[in-house]
Amino acid sequence: MKKQMELYVHIPFCERKCAYCDFLSFPADEAVKRRYTEILIGEIEMAGAAYRDTTVTSVFVGGGTPSVLDSGLMVKIFEALHRSFQINGEAEISMEANPGTVTEKKLLDYRSVGINRLSFGLQSADNRELRLLGRIHTFEDFVESFRLARSCGFGNINVDLMSALPGQTTESWLSTLRTVASMEPEHISAYSLIIEEGTPFFDRYGEGRGEGLLPDEDSDREMYHRTKEILAGYGYERYEISNYAKSGRECRHNIGYWTGVPYLGLGLGASSYVDGKRFQVTDNMSEYLNGEPGKCAEEQILTKRDMEEEFFFLGLRMVQGVSLCEFERRFGLSAEQVYPGLLEKLIREGVAEQIGDRFFLTEYGLDVSNCVMAEFLQD
């Protein structure tokens, strides 16, 4: 059987850095974007030569905001991808986009090179909340972009939403959920805001400064629990801690991450997991633009123990959990042999269940998943 892997392509550019964002992203002029595209294409061609015997099952273009790139440059990137890699004809090919940054021409160009799934970073349907986040768009911009994408033939769209925002109430969060779900995207990702160091939000709300400004823990938990209830009423099923989809519209690329499918990252700072190794392209823009395409910044060879731990860390994020038979097939030992008594202990505590081959977290277990995952660290 031919080897398989996924591709991730990083476009680090955005129009303006959001106040909560700690991703590798920044504004840039057109000359820098063109130069970056040239170097990225060189990296794609070099990587493609090294993986001629591998079929690509999904592609994800993330950022940053890939849709701020001129669509002519995006077309060149995809021409290089198709020329250099064996991309399965049925592959899921996703691209992130911000509301207000797409046009009919851009969307038609995306379709022409095989992009078949869009992921819109909306975050909130409340314009006041969007302003506090530092977003560059309004809810009305999102509606226009969403409708334009539909008219251009996109039948698979995700919408990113964020709860526990400054000044947000449970009622405003549920209103956002209902408003977006009524538009019937195929997929909704619903995350809680995390205050990350090095961001303007950390300066404002970090280390206890957000008390009284951010929703308290009880409100945050209520938002989390009501999300599943509300979205279920619109036909969305939760398949991962923070992800909901219409039947058959789960994000195949992300499921690949959670189930250990190898992936190759291309572009500034992009991470890879191939042949039991993790490696990352340099995240220094000057070094990337002036050095060799694909220069590796760091590399980690995963031990068998690392891979056993990650099998549970990642797989238990999914509602369906993990296959114990697959664990034994990969590692040559049963989960009971590697973790004697642990699975039974978690079942007794009510945080996990086992039905046949599947071991998965209960609703309560998903609530306290970080604590449960820590149990799989091997001393």
Image: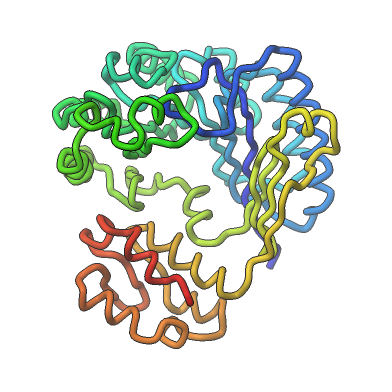
Query: In the drawing, does residue 59 fall left or right of residue 150?
Result: right
Above or below 363: residue 377: below
Q: Is residue 263 left or right of residue 97?
A: right
Q: Is residue 360 visible?
A: yes
How many numbered callouts? Answer: 0
Do we see residue 233 in this rendering? no
> Could you tell whether 224 is left or right of 44 in the image?
left
Which quarter of the figure has residue 243? top left
In the rendered image, the vertical position of residue 324 relative to residue 301, given as above or below? below
Q: Residue at x 32, y 39 (%)?
A: 192
The residue lying toward the viewer, choosing from 285 and 182, is: 285
> Percent position (x, y) of residue 336?
41, 85
In depth, the one of 294 and 46 nearer the eye is 294
User: Residue at horizontal 80%, vertical 26%?
Assistant: 38
Q: Position of residue 136 (x, y in %)?
A: 44, 14
On screen, residue 87 versus residue 141, left or right, reads right
With respect to residue 204, does 141 lie above or below? above
Residue drawn at 27 percent across, 58 percent down: 368
The N terminus lies in quadrant: bottom right
Image-quadrant location for residue 77: top right
Tell me which colouring the rendered structure shows. rainbow
Give residue 207's position: percent from left, percent from top. 34, 37
* Residue 255 percent across, percent down from the top left: 47, 53
